Structure formats: structure tokens, C-alpha cells
Amino acid sequence: MLLKEPRLNFTDVMNRKAQEKGIQLDNDQQRLIRHLETLAETLLRRRAAFAGLYLWGQPGRGKSFIVDSFFAALPLAQKKRAHFHTFFRELHQQLNGQGLDAALLELMGEARLLCFDEFHLHDIGDAMLVKRLIALAIARNVALIFTSNYPPRALLANPLYHDRFVPSIALIERHMTVMALNGPRDYRQQATGHGVFSEGAYLWPANAARRQALGLPDASGAVALTVGHRTLHAASAPGEFLHFTFAGLCEAPTAVMDYLALCEGHERWFLDGVPPLARVSPAAQQRFINLVDVLYDQQRRLFIAAACPLTELVAGVEQEDIARTASRLSQLTTE
């Protein structure tokens, strides 16, 4: 007797979720949901060919919400979801003892579906790793789903490096379905929050009374913290909050690997003295963007003491990812 293959009625799943959140799915979202339902049928076949989806759009349009719901509902054991930063941290750790293909295959494991959230590329080294990842996934019929704020042709936009990534863009466009979610609404601006992250706060002005009401620590001088093989300097001794100044964390030569390592032991983060970002270097701006990305994905509570309102904080910044940062910070309680 032949066993029936499992199925996923993803349209019903998303209609229920939308009703629970009190939102009406727009045309782009409904089209995406139908596509994912078809993709589920392909993945659940015992001998499925390669399938891929590259989903892009402005921040807050529901990309992660829909893809995360699909990932959770798909009755497939061999699946893996990873945030872009987290995956590459693991990959660099694996590369210390083996070649690239072996490291990628170890991270893939037995997965038949890999989902990457907030996919973006600004570094040529990461771009070359992504190129090999895509090629291996196609060769092994491992389905890929990328969510991104950028269409494929806008990846690695730096003209110094872009031409070297063009063959990978062609690979994406040839083997993956490219879809856009660019409806008029930023759902993060209208939602009550996004998990634990939204339980943080944005303080402006960050006076003593407001800081005291939230139990935020005062700066007590540089406190050395060992992170891997590096030493960072916190603004006060870690306790209920991990407390850094903007200068100490974002203007210092820190990296995504540091933020991920610190997330492992600290739930509440307090970033003190955040200036209008247009006044600091592009490198400090990018570190701040990366920090917010990591804390959002890791669902840590973030408290910011800023020198200006959020709209002024991000005004005049030309970094490609600043719109995503502003959308995410808008979920913090305004104090």
C-alpha cells in the first residue's frame, strides 16, 4: 500500500495568521503564499528537483513573517533556517579546520531546505562564499529561500566588486524564482511589536529620570570584556544590562562576530550616547546597522539612549541598509 505524501495547505495557515493579527493580506503577499504552497508540494515529493525562491522588498512588508510561517508549517524534518550573519559566523568557524566545500556540506547536513533571512552582501569575501553555496545547493537539490531588501542585481553594489558577482546573480535568476513584496504598508510601523526585541526602549531625551525608571545603569568607566581573542570595553560592569556607549561599540573596530558572541550571555543591551548617525563615519554607521540586525534576529531587548528622535537619528545616512534599521527600531517603545 502506497503511503500518501504529506501536504501543506499554506493558504489556510496564512489566512488564520492574518486574521489573528488583524491584517489583510495584499495582492503580492497572496501571490507569494500561493507560490510557497506550490513549492511545498515540490519539496514534499520524494524525488524533488532543485527549487529556489529569492524574495525581496522594502523593510516591514511581511517577507520574514510569511517565510518563517512557511518554514514552521512545512511538514519536512530536513530543513534549516539561518540568519545571514549567524550562518557566516558558523561557516568561518568551520573553515578553520577544513576546506570550503567540506565546511558548507557540514553546515547543510541532511537539509533539503535552507532558508536565509535578511540576505545582503557588502563584502567580496562573503560574496565568493555565497557563490559556492548556491552552486552546491543546486548540485545537491537543496532548496534555497532567500529574503532580502535588495533585488538580485543590486547585491554587492560596490562597483569595485560587483562585476565579480555578476555570474552568481545570473545563477540566482536562472535557477530561483525571483519575487517582490513591495506593498505600501510597513507592518512593523503598525504592529504592536516583534517578540522580545520590541520590549526594549528608545529614549529621547535620555534624562536621568527616564533612565532610572527603566533601571538603566550609569556609565562608570571602561570595563574590559574578553570576547574570543579580543578585548572590548563596556561602559559599566555587566549585570542586568550589557552597557556600551556608541563610541565604545560602534566607533571601535568591532564586528558582527563580537555581537553574536556577546548575545550568548546577555539578554538586555543598553547602547548609550547614540548621536545622529550622519555625524559619524560610514564604518560606525554600518556597525550600528549590523548590531541592530543581530539583536533583532537574536531577539534581545535593546535600550537606546539617543541624542535625537529616531527620524533625525537616521536622516541623511546613505548606507544601503538604513531603512531596515529604522523600521526595526520603530518597534521599540518610545520613552
Image: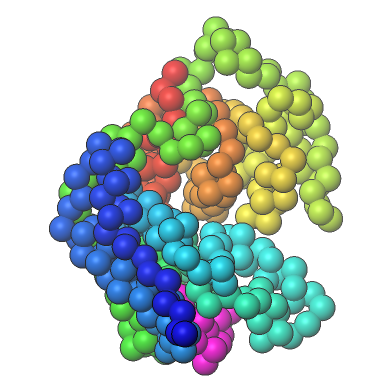
Q: Camera-side residue: 37 or 27? A: 37
User: Between residues 261 and 289, which one lies in front from this camera angle?
Assistant: 261
Residue 179 rendering spot, x and y as whole percentages: 27, 70
Q: Which residues are magenta?
A: 129-144
Residue 130 picture location, percent across and down: 53, 78
- Identity of the residue drawn at 31% across and 68% down: 37
Q: Is residue 219 left or right of residue 208?
A: right
Question: Percent position (x, y) of residue 86?
Answer: 61, 60
**Residue 331 locus on image (x, y percent):** 40, 34
Give the residue displayed 36% in from the left and 60% down from the top: 149
Q: Residue at x 79, y 49 (%)?
A: 227
Residue 142 lies in the magenta stretch: yes
Direction left: furthest residue: 27
* In magenta stretch: residue 131: yes
User: What secondary structure do most residues of the magenta stretch adopt?
Assistant: helix
Residue 106 appears left or right of 251: right
